[in-house]
Amino acid sequence: MEEQPITPALVEEHNLTAAEYERIVATLGRTPTLTELGIFSVMWSEHCSYKSSRVHLRRLPTRGPCVIQGPGENAGVVDIGEGEAAVFKIESHNHPSFIEPYQGAATGVGGIIRDIFTMGARPIACLDSLRFGPLLDAKNRFLLDGVVAGIAGYGNCIGIPTVGGEVYFDDSYSLNPLVNVLCLGVARRDQIFYGKASGVGNPVIYVGARTGRDGIHGATMASAEFDETSQERRPTVQVGDPFQEKLLLEACLEAFKTGAVLGIQDMGAAGLTCSTCEMGARGGVGVRIELDRVPQREEGMTPYEIMLSESQERMLMTVAAGREGEILEIFRKWDLEAAVIGEVIADGVMHVEQGGRVVARIPNTALTDDAPVYERPLRRPAYLDKVNALNLDRLALPGGLFRAFKDMLAAANLCSRRWIYRQYDHMVRTNTALLPGADAAVLRLKGRRAALAVTTDGNGRYTWLDPRRGAMIAVAEACRNLVCAGARPLAATNCLNFPSPEDPEVMWTFAEVIDGIAEACAAFGTPITGGNVSFYNETLGKQIMPTPVIGMLGVIDDVERRMDIAFKEPGHAVLLLGETLEELGGTEYLELVHGLKQGPIPRLDLQREANLQGAVREMIGAGLLASCHDVSEGGLAMALADCCFASPDPTMAVEVTLAQDLREDAILFGESQSRAVVSAPDAHADRIAAIAADWSVPCALIGRVSRDVFAIRLNGHTLVIDDVISLRDIWTTSLETILH
Amino acid sequence: MKFGIVVFPGSNCDHDAYHVAKHVLGEEAVFLWHKDESLQGCDVVILPGGFSYGDYLRTGAIARFSPIMKSVGRFAADGGRVIGICNGFQILLEAGLLPGAMLKNERLKFVCRHVHLRVETCRTPFTGLCAPGEVLSIPVAHHDGNYFADAATLAELKAHDQIVFRYCTEAGLLRAEANPNGSAEHIAGICNRAGNVLGMMPHPERAAEAMLGSADGLKIFQSLLAAPAGAR
């Protein structure tokens, strides 16, 4: 099979262009073997090489006082004080999840968890950002059901709580679901491990599961759009075994304690190929491996198959010479495969042998730093002008705003996510200090006063209507969510989900999104420490909306000062911080009630946003607030409802009286940025007002927490009034009703 | 009091149980590796939650054959105190230390949420500090918690006061909607006839600190500390 001649058809099958093939021949100074062609094909795939995005990603701010490791490693690392570091990253598993939702999502979870513990961190939490097509379609219900079960199946078994995330539905995700998983871990600051080979002569050890024929060309599959034959690509989806990964996790953390491990990288996309050449490249050395020594699940595997397999739950490590026995012993204790399969060499090449024969010998950098980089053409999409011409004068108020409000409570994008998060073990490891449903997840750090807060945010409709501002809002909202939970935002990770980069209009939106993230992250002092780009999210020419998802990490200095969104006591004052403008473009309301997906989306003034966040932090820090919730999708009416429904007391309600000269629907459902709803005892109201004034944040007492009766009055008449229990019931059971 | 927490390769609530014993209660605690046989002189053995050996076959079906379980069986027979939580309960059933079997949840989905438990008996060393009929708020997190036993076994359990916890409403009423998994007679936890072996699906170790939403689970551990010494 090795001798198979390389034909143009074979090159094309490997998703390489003729020009790229010529470049391979020039780099090697000869024709590649079939194994080498396969290796180039995966390493130069969009998924592994970032060849279309790299020139843009350089514009992201990646440095800051807290950053220990920025992009380029398995995950980002930030300082969280007291000698500890947080290790976190978000990654997509969109393509596999469409082809096979359970395993696709499960291995997405497994992959990102490995990225975290590879760095020496104990993973403490996962969050998922999901997008599906409308649930009226059985196929989308099947995908949601499978993805949620896959995430649960993997996360619950390995014992890492799934503590938060988000899910939204839109037609553009119908045949292109998005499955983005963020994992967070904690390590000792001085015990971080890197994917770097070092020390010529040091042994290279393979640990974990055996290599099988699954997942071959997974990375290449994820670097192309889908058509009607996509289901034929099921064999490219890997099968996850969370029990194996649990063993691997414990064994690796135990091995790290010996001090014998010098470098380690997980085998994710592009498997053994990727770990071998990347570890060599980062260390400025080479790695020689012998495939006969690789533990294999089946007989007769070719070098091509072994090098390209994406079998899960495997790691590659370099160990100090002479200490391999200690490491092998630990893996034996955990009943895992472990074998010395090669060594570090001085030449900067990836050298692969089988049966004493060299089957691949490629300079590391040809596969990594020197992989092709494209400056793809950009063109502003023509649709933008058309969809940003919303004329509110022509938009009639709906017959009954109360009816509209009830529709929104039941809307798939706004209703309770209970059906999903109850399938996830969100409490294991007993650190979950805020249960799902809050603005952010809060994880305590045992033995410390401090806690971590983490959230994911991204509104595809906003970024479709206005890529740059939509991306800025995603960053602003992520920060705001953390601040509302009592945290100080530290650093971010991003998952950039887009259609084909070969479409200049897509590439333009990508560039705009990068600029938006860059500007907002710089303004909030939250550098990007890593992430993932997922292109080619389109099927049969139908593209997803550009969907950047921001994962944001923050620190709460005193876990007792964490804040949640639930109203606490009838009689408490309810205040609205920030200004409500007449903004309905891009809102859930506009699409749900009027069937319009039109902009302009809400304005964002970074200074005002920073002021709002500063004021909220000061109020929480001073212990003045009983609850705090940012106002986002669904507007003020939805935010007030959330604060009631989050209470364990089903009778907790609110009565507010608003007075503002704006369209009634804009007041209720507009999504003006930089706002928060807070509640507090009356005695604190003056101090809250004073802090707001110091920060130039508008602050209005709009009502009181009540019992049983949920009411919103405006300019003297009642827009919404009902028994809170019946409203709560609509909101709580909507997703379950749709799905069963 | 010395707590021993058994670590099967797929245990994932072992650290949580250890944390409660060691740091919340301030007692001695050790991990007991599944390949060992020694219980290291522990006063209480905890079989923690998790997925013992992956549990792809049937929860706890392989774990019962592990070396440590031989010792746990002897310890229990001698009157030693054993708590199986979640996967630990499933293992106790498979090992024959408690009667009955575990089915998949009625709705065939994993369920993680806070539930209410009614204390049905205070005669055990695990519930001595509870009042009869007291309602505890403790979370569940499982896919296979639908306890099943035939009518004769259920009658036996009742006759010998072996039903320790039942799922209930906040007010302590037995209602189908308060039962998260469809278990027979709303059973959440049972003990052996002597009362020294407890199996329960809910996780008391997750409800041992107010910060986590409830400290009701602590009563189970505190009852153990307050109970007259058991066998070693």
Image (tube, coloured by chain):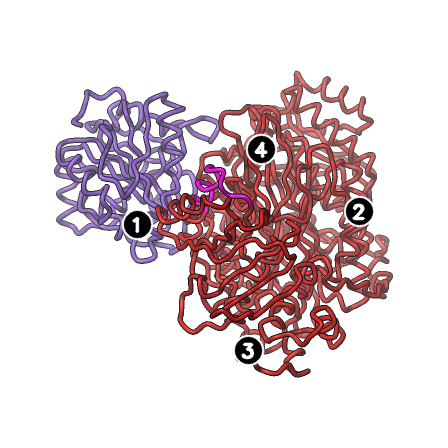
Chain colours: A red, B purple
Q: Dot 1 corresponds to which residue?
A: B146
| Residue type highlighted by circle 2 | Pro
Q: Relative to B109, is A653 above or below?
A: above
Residue B205 appears in which quarter of the rendering? top left
| Residue type highlighted by circle 3 | Glu
Q: Dot 3 corresponds to which residue?
A: A2
Magenta extent: A249-262
Q: Which mark's residue is nearer the viewer, 2 or 3?
A: 3
* Contact? badges 2 and 3 (CB < 8 Å): no
Residue A159: x %, y % from top left: 43, 44
* Contact? badges 1 and 4 (CB < 8 Å): no
Front residue of A31/A537: it is: A31
- Mark closest to the chain's N terminus, 4 or 3: 3
- Estimate how packed mark 3 is, as few (under 14), some (14 to 19) or many (20 or more) residues with alpha carbons within 10 Å: few
Q: Is residue B113 left or right of residue A487?
A: left
Q: Dot 4 corresponds to which residue?
A: A190
* Gap between marks 3 and 1 measured at Cα: 54 Å
Residue A20: x %, y % from top left: 73, 72
* Gap between marks 4 and 2 measured at Cα: 44 Å
